[in-house]
Amino acid sequence: MDLYGELEWRGLVYDATEGLRDVLSREAVTVYAGFDPTAASLHVGHMLPILSLARFQRFGHSPIALVGGGTGLIGDPSFKAAERALLTIDQVEANVAGIRQQLARFLDFERGTAAARLVNNGEWLMTLGAIEFMRDVGKHFTVNAMMAKESVRRRIEGTEGISYTEFSYPLLQSYDFLVLYDRFTCTLQVGGSDQWGNITAGMDLIRRVRGGKAHGLVFPLLMTASGTKFGKTEAGSVWLDATLTSPYEFYQYWFNVEDGDAVKYLKFFTFLDQRRIDELDQASRREPEKRHAQRELAREVTRLVHGEDAVSEAEAAAQVLFRGDITTRGTLEQIKQLLANVPSLTITYAVSWPVVDLLASAGVTSSKGEATRLIRGGGIYVNDRRITDEKEQLTPDQAIEGQVFVVRKGKKDNFLIHISR
């Protein structure tokens, strides 16, 4: 199967310029995708363009990951209901540094003629003069054409409107494409389907200014089978940074995807071949309760992002949770991963703490009186042990590894209390 056929089979071609299939079949091209540093980490939604660049590289093409150190100061208005809050230069630079490290996990920057490049558009946009930009770039765009773009029209018709700053974003992205065309003979840009207008604008600029031919390919925007936004949980975005989304939470996100999404995500987010994915599809249809596709998806994506050890640790932690003996069998690290999103408090080290005082000060209960009533009713557990005496004193040696108490109120409400030494 050729690259274009591979992308089609995986469902990754939402739209593409005419003739791209032939170009990819007869020559090696340089292809780029952009990543705006609006946060300190990329999230799972960015994995579609990242892995697509990696697929191009595996077929002998040269990928460029463009980090938007310049455009990140503006913000892409595409299909946003309101204008983004502007970031400072220091914030953008810090975000760029974090994103660089994450991109290096997926792309080979030492692969001979197909080696990947990491480029920051702040290099040219931060030194670009306003008069130069308006003369050399702005004159090639009509306001009529820009206002006809759906993403701009939506904002104009809405209550927020669109600022001149965001209105200019497509010009900056088009200029990026021109610079990469000049410097690296880059002739293809890829991205989400919301980027189609920006991509075609860059292609048009290259044609007008250089008389060159460039191409674009866009992927479908992702929604879950139930119609919710991909990559979101009750806790927020699913980040690639392990300090923002733990490897256990990351694994569980993929393991818990809906049956209607599992095979599609195997195609989108893994390098498993068609035969293996078909096998998993058939196994899931025979035994849906065993979640064959989801388990393989969670393993593959967690391995790509966090490594093999993270897969083993996530599955071991899941087993601890499944057995219902978190505090007796789980390690401190597993407990922190399993309960990463529960309320927590740090207390100062002491010889002992009256349990009623501890519950009230930690916010487990609203008062000492409520703590007393819950204990008498059998509704308080510390490290899986029911507390039966409201006069009990807890000591540091009762804490898990001397550092943490896991408190459960009722059947479901968990709290972590950390001891500061």
Image (cartoon, rainbow, N blue to C red):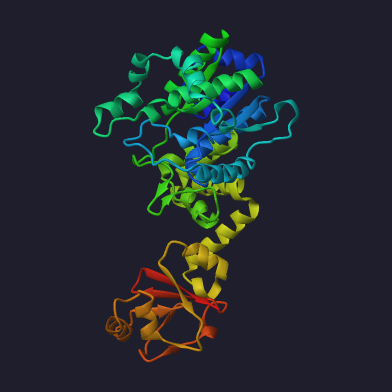
Q: Quarter-wise, where is residue 330 in the image?
A: bottom right
Q: Which residue is located at x 52 percent, y 33 percent? A: 70
Residue 324, given in percent of the width and then of the height, sits at 46, 70
Residue 190, given in percent of the width and then of the height, sits at 52, 26
Residue 342, given in percent of the width and then of the height, sits at 41, 65
**Residue 196 appears left or right of 147:** right
Dividing the image into 4 quarters, which one contains the N terminus? top right
Q: Which residue is located at x 42 percent, y 35 percent? A: 222
The number of discs equals 0
- Most foreground residue, 210 or 259: 210
Hey, which residue is sitting farthest right in the picture?
Answer: 112
- Most foreground residue, 377 or 366: 366
Residue 29's place in the image compared with 274, above or below, is above
Question: Does residue 291 appear in this view?
Answer: no
Q: Which residue is located at x 60 percent, y 40 percent? A: 103
Question: Does residue 265 appear in this view?
Answer: yes
Q: Quarter-wise, where is residue 105 in the image?
A: top right
Q: Which residue is located at x 53 percent, y 41 percent? A: 280
Q: Quarter-wise, where is residue 380 in the image?
A: bottom left
Hey, which residue is sitting farthest bottom in the picture?
Answer: 391
Hey, which residue is sitting farthest top in the picture?
Answer: 211
**Residue 228 appears left or right of 196:** left
- Most foreground residue, 190 or 84: 84
Residue 194, given in percent of the width and then of the height, sits at 41, 28
Dividing the image into 4 quarters, which one contains the C terminus? bottom right
